[in-house]
Structures are given as structure tokens and as C-alpha cells.
Amino acid sequence: MQVTRKNSLFTRYELIGFAILAAIIFIVFPMIMDTFRLNLFGKYLTYAFVAVGLVLCWGAGGILSLGQGVFFGLGGYCMAMFLKLEASTPENTSIQSTPGIPDFMDWNQLTALPWWWEPFHSLTLSLIAVIVVPVAFAFIIGVAMFRRRVGGVYFAIITQAIAAVMTILIIGQQGYTGGVNGITDLRTLLGWDIRTDEAKEILYFVNGALLFVCLGIAQYVRKSKLGRLLIAMRDQEDRVRFSGYDVANFKIFIFCLGAAFAAVGGAMFTLQVGFMSPSFVGIVPSIEMVIFAAVGGRLSILGAVYGTLLVNWAKTTFSESFPELWLLGLGALFIAVVMAFPNGLAGVWSEHVMPRLRKLGSRGDSGTPDAAPSTPAAE
Amino acid sequence: MSDFDKSRKNNGVSRRALLAGGVALSASLFAPKVLRAQDYPTAEVNTTGLAVTDDTVTIGILHSVTGTMAISETGSVQAEKLAIEQINAQGGILGRKIEYIQEDGASDWPTFAEKAKKLLVNDKVASVMGCWTSASRKAVLPVFEQYNGFLYYPTFYEGLEESPNVIYTGQEATQQIIAGLDWVNKEKGAKSFYLLGSDYIWPRTSNKIARKHIENFLTDCKVVGEEYYPLGHTQFNSVINKIRLKKPDVIYAIVVGGSNVAFYKQLKAAGIDMTKESPLLLTISVTEDEIRGIGGENIEGAYACMKYFQSLDNDNNREFVAAFKEMWGDDMVIGDVTQAAYLGPWLWKAAVEKAGSFDVDKVRAASPGIELTSAPEGYVKVHENHHLWSKTRVGRAQADGQYEVVFETADLVEPNPFPEGYQ
């Protein structure tokens, strides 16, 4: 780690922020929750991967993608394909006309496994595919859009269209994808039953660890020269271009990175929930993921995690208590947050809580004026 | 001390139950036998830690009350609540009142899985009435199998499934298809069929069975076209033109959801008058609920093949319709699935009482052979394969949105979720 304060990966406050989040995820949640609730929060945390990616793309880079569900879904589907093949042994599927292929293929009169399903017999190839397939897709979209200098609201609309196209494609090709039902009834990972309580707990911690890896990468990117360029691009794209930088390349990179985060989230989602369906690929989940980032604060990677947890927790709690009214409650929450706190939870923290803490702290400590946690330096 | 308290409490219940029993007895000779909770100690009827107390038992209701499926699933929720209320009025199950925890699947399959798990793991419900679409059932199935829950699933569906943890109170595909095709062939002399449907597993599997039946089991009959449209599709002009070109005797339509409205309106606008039966339209996807959206005048004259119509003329059904309207309002209509959902709590009650226990394994073992003579659709019986023996009926849509029953099978049709020769 570098010695000079300016270039170090974390400021002191950021380090405290990371430590608090780690404590919450790895110590507090497992202590206060039973396996069912913990698994539920594990599921929420998979969305946090997407939200962190969105903070980089949207908050830092100014690229608003309304199609992150596509990458989440692709990652999840790659994982689900592997698990489905493992679950579809000839013994398990002996009642089918063609034993040994996934059940939905049999319903759709397929008699052999399509060639592009073959690589998913191997866990290694599947794990590679989890990252590579969504990133390759993001790369194609990125090259097609950013090289032509498509940006802003046009980019958002196009990503939304891609999300819609993807859903229609998956539902339409049901013989190959499981259609609207998705890929269900996943059981084991290399013989390890992922449905047991112990497995759920282990997966929760794996999920948490991977989230911190992604958070670390995100933090590194933000602190690097690239991160500063992203902010510069967001604020004055032309000036960056005139300074001799290839703006498109940076955008493509950050968009691919966001896609990779989302894909990891998707794969962890499949493992924890036990199935994957097109309802995570479409427009609605994609926009929901943007809302998670917005509630948490689109400028803060940690805020995004808290935002995701809060919104999903509220969703579950409201819907358990008021099955017929909960959507209204959730809507009210969004309106309240956006009206009162445009920078989300992170904004509340840095604008209201931190100054007070700092006032308290300044008696014994000289403080660090440049280091508002959870907000990029340029803000 | 606690035993004393318990017996006092139980006596209270039994007095009430006896009183209720007396009232019921005077009201009707056929009043059900009232079982007293004290004859069934909680420790004995519940050995697996379900949510059963000395005077209540908790079950789950898991349907979409928000999102696109809410319009279809609301009827099921209402029917289940009605059945629960009626059972409680008769003294409950094994002397215990049914309480329910309702969860919203929000038309979202993963949410269904999450809520199913919550009901089974957190709330320890003794059974669940729920799900509507196949996708939601597929999503919750692993949860029910893992935690050994017990689900009553009301919708007619594609078959190809037989879970030890589900009782299917709707028809599987063959029960809904074969009798109807035989009927149009025999009574209406239909020889050529045009199959069309929404593009997902139920219409596709159903049409597969229909095609096999038409080609292999009906003499000189043929399928002249088969087409699928995405869910939510609203442009049916091209298929209507093809239908005019091919002139089939029967349009066999399995269009679902909002697409129905566009489909029937466009058929009518294209000058295909269903009351003239040329071509005749036969559907297995339009119940009285859907007609409310389509409009009776747009579908008048079409035939539907179901097991239940609101207009069924029998005492059970008249009582059911009256009770449903009293509870939920006079403008309610009752479709096939709503009736099937109503059977759920009753079938569960019968199975629990036969088993003398709420334990899922015992209820499962007791389920095959359960009979219900009080079903609105008439007599039904649970098959070994967890589906119901039930009659198939054909109804003709009227301008007022009701069906007029024109045919019913003489006997109950055996459920056959894995039909040989139709795969």
C-alpha cells in the first residue's frame, strides 16, 4: 500500500466505513438472524453487486444503464445451466421421453442437448462463462454505443430496450432456456446439496466475501487515475476528450466492470435461491436495481449496499404485513427518499451525520477536511 | 396445574363446538360430525412442530394480490377464505379453528419461492393454499419438497408433474382436452382444427396432446395450423387471415391473460361470428373471469371446455354461488379455477380428519381416495397421483358473460398427468 496519504486506497473514515459494513454483514446479521432470514439477506446482497456496479457506471461515470438485469441474468443463467445439468441425471429424469436432458427441454420436444449447453457440464468453464459471457455482451454494447458517442438518456433507453429484448428472447426460446418458468429445481453443486441450512450459511459468507472483493475493486478504481477521469468525463466529457484521452475506452471498461459485478451477483443469486428466471432480466428488475443505488446514494459504493438492503428489507416486511397495500408503502418510501434526500442514504450521512461527528471529533483530533467518506473527492 | 388449565380450556371449546353442532344438526340432517379438540390432543395430532395449538391451526394462503396476475388470482384467494370461514363455522378441523397467514407472491416467481419458504420455515403452516401460474408452482416446488410442506394448487395446468407435496385440485391437460375434442368431433362433425395459443408451457403441452389426439385417436381428422404468440401479444390479424384461408372447422384457442381481449375483439371485428359456428371456436383458457375483460358480446357463441361453470345446476353449486356472492359482492363471477381453489381447504380438512393428524406425512398418506360430495362441481375424488377425478364439461358463452352447459361426461374422468401415447 502506498504511503502518501493522498494516494492511499482508503482514507481513515472510509476504512471505518468498510469495517462497519463488514461487521454488520459478517457478525451482526449471522448473530441476530435465523437461517431463513439470513438466506433472505444473502439474496438481497446479491443485488448489492449490481448496485455497486451502478455506482461506478452511473454515479462516477455518468452512464445510466437501465439494463443491468441483463448481466445479472446472464451470470445467473450460466450458473443455473451448470446446476441444471448436474440435477438432470438420467436417473432423476427417467420419466422423460429423453432422459438425461433438462426437464423443460423434454417438454418442448427437444431430444438432444443443444451444443451450446455442452460446456456447462464443466464447473470451471461455467464459472468462466459467468464472467465472460456478460462481459463480452457488455463489451459489444459498449463498443457499439460509446464509439458512436451515444450517451446520456439515449444510452439509458437503449439499455432498457436490450433488457426487454433479452426477456423476450429467453421466454421465446423456451426449449433452450426454460421460458417464463426459468431454470428451476437446482439441487447440488458438485454433489454438495445447496438446499440445506448449512449450505445456505456457507453461501451467505461466500457471497459476503465476494461482495467485499467487488467493493475493494470498486474502491481501487475510484481512487485510481481512471476514477478521476471517470468523474471528469461525467462532468465535462469534451474537455477530457480534448485532453487526448479516448473517452470511449474508459466508458467501455467501466461498463464491462459493472456487468462483471452484476454477473457475479447473478451467479450467487442462483446458488442461494435455487433457480433463475427471466423475471430478473427484464425492465422492472433493472430499474429496481437503479432504485437500490439511488436510495443508497449513487455516489457511494457503501451507500449502495445499504440502500439495497434497506429497500429489499422494506419490500419483504411491508409485503408480509400488508399483502394488499405494500406496493403503496414502498412507493411512498421512494418518493420520500428522493424528495428529501436526493443523494440517498449516503447523502444523509455525509451531509448531516458526519459534520456533527466531526465537530465532536475535532476536539481531540485535527480531522481531515478532504475526506468525506462515501463521497468521491470531486463532489 | 397446566393439565387442569388445558382441560378447562378444552371443555370451553367443546361446549361451543357442541352448541354449534346442535345448531347445525337442527339446520340440516346432513350436518357434518363435529370433532372435539380434546379427543385429539395437540401432542398427538402434531408431532412435527407445525403451527397447531389446542384450538387453532394455521395455514398459508399464497397468491398474487399485486402485479399482473392479481386479477386472476383474487378469485382463488376469495374462494379459499370462504371455504375457511365455512369450515370454521362448522367447528373447524379436529376441533381447531383455521387461521391463515396470507402472503403476496406479487406475480413474481422468486417472490413466491421466498414467501413459500417463509410460510413453511418461519410460520410452520400446516398446509398452503396457493399458486396459480405454472411458473410460480415450479418456483415453489423445490421449497415444498425440501421442507415437506403441503400445497393445494387450484389451476388447470399442463400435467407432467406429480409431486408428493402437492394436491392438484384443477384438471391436468388430458382431463380438459380429450373429452372436448371428442365432443366437437361427434356432435358437431368437426374434422379440421386450427391450434393456437400463448407461447409458454401450458398451451404448448396442451396443444401437443390435442394434436396427438386429433391425429391418432379421431378418425379422418387433421390439424391445419398451429401457432403461438408471446404472452401479452395483441395483434392477431395475421392469424385471423390464415384462419379464413384454411377454413378449419374448429379454432382451438389457448390464449391467456390480456391477449384474450384483443384476440376475441379482433375475431369479431374480422367478421367471424362465433354464434354461427363456422368455424366453431373451442377454448380451454377462458373462464367467466376472463369474459369480464373480453366482454360477453365479443365471445358469445364460443365453446369452452372446463370442469366447472358458474351456471352449473345443482344444489351444491347454488349454495356455493350464493355464499360467495354474499361474502364478496353480487357482481362477482366464479370461474373454473376459483371453484377448484374452493375445494382446497375442504380436501385438506377431509384428509386431516381421515388421518386424525396434521402431520404432513400422514395427511399425504390419507389423501388418495378422499371424496367430496359437497363440491360445487359435483362429486370429486383424489387419485393416487394427487390429481382429482372430475367430470369434463363443455359450455357455450352467452352475451351476459355466463356459460350455458351443453355437455358433460357421463363419468368422472381419470387424471393422467403422464399420458402414454401423447408425449
Image: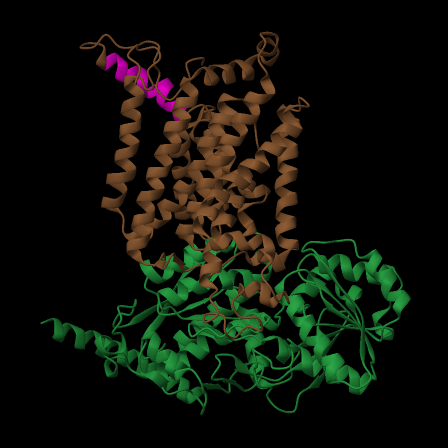
Chain colours: A brown, B green
Can I make out residue A282 in this image?
A: yes
Q: Main secondary structure of the magenta part?
A: helix
Q: Quadrant of residue A315?
A: top left
Work out which quarter of the rendered image holds the C terminus of chain B and state it.
Answer: bottom right
Q: Residue furthest left?
A: B1
Task: Kindly identify the residue that appears in the image at 43 percent across and 87 percent down.
Answer: B31
The percent coordinates of residue A198 (x first, y second) are 28, 55
Can I make out residue B66 in this image?
A: no
Task: Kindly identify the residue that appears in the image at 57 percent across and 43 percent down.
Answer: A284
Q: Quadrant of residue A163?
A: top right
Q: Quadrant of residue B224?
A: bottom right
The percent coordinates of residue B407 (x first, y second) are 71, 85
Give the extent of the magenta segment. Answer: A345-360
Q: Is residue A62 above or below residue A237?
A: below
Residue A126 or residue A377, whichever sits in front? A126
Residue B295 or residue B188, whichever sits in front? B188
**In the image, residue A284 lies in the stretch drawn in magenta:** no
Work out which quarter of the rendered image holds the N terminus of chain B and state it.
Answer: bottom left
The percent coordinates of residue B226 (x first, y second) are 76, 66
Q: Is residue B73 above or below residue A243?
A: below
**In the image, residue A349 lies in the stretch drawn in magenta:** yes
Query: Would you say A378 lies left or right of B184 here?
Result: left
The percent coordinates of residue A375 (x first, y second) are 40, 19
Residue B8 or residue B100, whichever sits in front? B100
Q: Is residue A237 above or below residue B238?
A: above
Task: Kindly identify the residue that appears in the image at 48 percent across and 38 percent down.
Answer: A262
